[in-house]
Amino acid sequence: MAPPETVPAEGVPGIEEGERRRVSRRALLQAALIGGAGIAALPLLALIGSITKTGPKPATVIYSLNSDWLFGGTYQPGAEAAAFDDAEFTTVTIPHSTAELSWHGWNPASWQQVSIYRRRFKGAPLLGTKTSKNRVFVDFDGVMVNCTVVCNDQVVATHQGGYLPFSAELTHTLTSGQNVLSVIVDARALPVPPISIGAGPASVDFMQPGGIYRDVSLRVVPQIFIADLFANPAQVLTAAPRVDVVCTIDAAVQQAGALATLTVELLEDGVNPIATKTLGLSLIEGAGTASLSLTNLGAVKLWSPDSPTLSTVQATLSVAGIGAHVKTRRIGFREATFQPDGFYLNGQRLQLFGLNRHQLYPYTGMAMPARVQRRDAEILRNEFNCNMVRCSHYPQSPHFLDACDELGLLVWEEAPGWDQVSTQQSWQNLVVQNVRDMVTRDRSRPSVIIWGTRLNETPDYPALWTATRQAAKQLDPSRPSSGAMDSRNLAQWDEDVFAFNDYSFSRTTGTSELFPPLPGLPYLITESVGVVEARPMHFTWTDPPALLAKQAALHAQTHNLARSDTRYSGLLAWAGFDYCSLRGGRPANVKWAGVADGFRIPKLGAAVYRAQVDPKTKPVIVPVFFWELGGVQPPGPQAMIASNCEQLDIFVDGGRVTTALPASGSPLYKNLPYPPFLVPLPVPARNAGHPPPDLHIVGYVAGQRVAEVRMSADPSRDHLVVTADDASIAADGSDATRIVFRGVDAYGNQRRVSTGTVTLTVAGPGVLVGDNPFEFGAYGGLGAVWVRSEAGQVGTITVTAIHPMLGQAQATVQSSRPDATTALI
Ligand code: GAL
């Protein structure tokens, strides 16, 4: 059995056992020096008093290392060697998945292997000069699952687990000429969280395709530099708010006694200093922390979902004879607390309203670039009006979280885990380390309001959950810890907030139910609805409209219940988006629990979310049905229309059939800010010789007509539409945007189409990421692909889609020169 500090044998193929252990210890020491794990044990920096800010110009460069990787597929021993002939390798860009995937039918066998990536780069621009030498790190934001990093034939890092960042110092292995960085990626279902020892890929409810699936960069810093910066606003609702700052300084290669100044500034709009503090430091060799508080901030603008004002904290470390290093963090001034009577943001009770998100995408697994990651946050906040997301069940893309900070989307973040815990110490140590790495990565973010330190739906392991809770508290005393539970046994629970996955429903009435809150405890519902009540257990586009409409009703009902008692802090329903799963992922290994599908196209189930917005911001009318030749689908005494209007006038074939008001009196919906409308709609008469009738819904607020929707029942006017999410992407070979194609009626409403394929062609400097042809009819009359730029190739990308009956349509995207921050080397 491998001792806890070693990487599992399968993680480092081709390296002898003795060598592997030596390497692992070295990597761990390095992690301790740069990552924070061992910092508490290292000497603190000595404070020698406040001095005036002086010093040389900051020298910090971060190069994107996403482009020009060579991917060799299955790893052959020796393929990491600098001299290895990689002429047969394929050029790829990061984010990258080792498997070629469709949107469905994923089989872990397609990525259950060890693969090799290689990247060449020139060292000369990185190393500095004889008198001013740099240190160089390669930073990996996430590699699935385990990996070994080799630079010029030396192992520089090993890492276990796919969801957290790690770095390797290259300083001593780089040459000024050509360097070869090799990354051996083991994407098998290794016994690292969330997968327990002895368990396979089907033991967790989400698939984990492998690869270097998050960004890679080279970080060039001076000999002594700021390894981490934690900026934590405090007392924000008082007359004396402050920002508590902890800088972790890496002086690993420096003789003791060097003199330094550390200047920390609070910048408004990223530029104007509001507060500054400078410390004089005498550095002690190793790593240590320097703490200070920025005070006299004046009146700070608070961060909230409605007004997500961000500020920047900038730390500059200047060391005599060495140079200067700058590190920044974006922060927001907010106070977030969970109380027994609900969640409070900035002293006001705020009902948490949201969804869970998996980071899985069709075609690429988890490997999507910043723009696409950010878009999920935009959908959740701006289209589904959520004020919170749960990152189920692992730390998610930093780009997604950046967007959460910017958009005001509150975040539950949790360590990788799902329903299982190994009793082995080595596995449990990884859980604790994951919590440390997660908290260290994201503790300055205003959006993150709670840490999931107890893994999702796991039994009680008191010692482990104490250790993870303490790890989080030590690194971030400001946030509560929790863990989503599937039992309400308080004897086995010891967290700050009771979080419960509540899938209750009544088989008699077919409606959502919730357990009552637990008295005296902060109480949050972390999952609800899912596919539990669907029969069969999915919400696909080809399911009967009655089932799709039921998803909307169940989500509306569960949020309604969560608003019925202020002791519910709120509810995060299951789930935002469909995802691939081997546990009940049916059909096609997809879990169809999303209110939007895997392509992020809203189903009927998203309707009530879409309407929960002030009509002054956006008046909304979303029919929870299809309007077809036979009338409303699903047929029935009442059709649901999700809307934030005060009144709807409804016309069929030009004649008013009803004037409707929201279902504000319905116990199923009355607590929602904007309850849906439940409207009897007639089955239109079939008049021979007349075209099938239109449905026209007009919405009013304060007597003013503010919105309208027209729907056609005439299939002869159906056509194909193609849309691109973005007008422009960066020509860096990584950036991508979504192209959606849909069969729609004359007014653009989704039509249920059950036949034909869509064939796509791409002209210009873009690469199609997706199935082509696409099984359009089998999917239900819609679908999507992504189009990715080609590195260095600017121009217009045109995507054309053709369907045998619905015709042809196009979308264009401009591929533009990338900005300086994505500089290629
Ligand atoms: C929950 C679990 C989720 C998901 C859901 C199934 O118990 O926490 O990850 O698997 O069930 O719809």
Image (spheres, grey):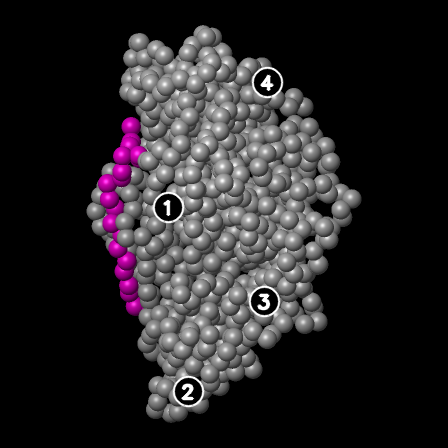
Depth check, front residue: 181 or 80: 181
Q: Are marks 1 and 2 in contact (CB under 8 Å)?
A: no
The number of discs equals 4
Label 4 sits on residue: 41
Q: Nearer the viewer, mark 1 or mark 3?
A: 3
Label 3 sits on residue: 671
Between the C-alphas of marks 2 and 4, the distance is 76 Å
219 over 197 or under it: above or below = above
Residue 811 magenta = yes
Give, as a three-letter code, the residue at label 4: Ala
Label 2 sits on residue: 656
Between the C-alphas of marks 1 and 3, the distance is 35 Å
Between the C-alphas of marks 1 and 2, the distance is 44 Å
Say which residue appears at 28% left-offset and 58% top-offset.
Answer: 811
Residue 200 magenta = no
630 over 210 or under it: above or below = below
Report whether residue 572 is seen.
no
Residue at the limit of the structure toward the front, as seen here? 239
Element assignment for label 4: helix
Say which residue appears at 65% left-offset and 53% top-offset.
Answer: 341
Depth check, front residue: 639 or 635: 639
Label 1 sits on residue: 371
Report whether residue 550 is seen.
yes
Give, as a three-letter code, the residue at label 1: Arg
Residue 350 placement: quadrant: bottom right
Lower sequence index among marks 3 and 4: 4
Q: Which residues are magenta?
A: 806-825
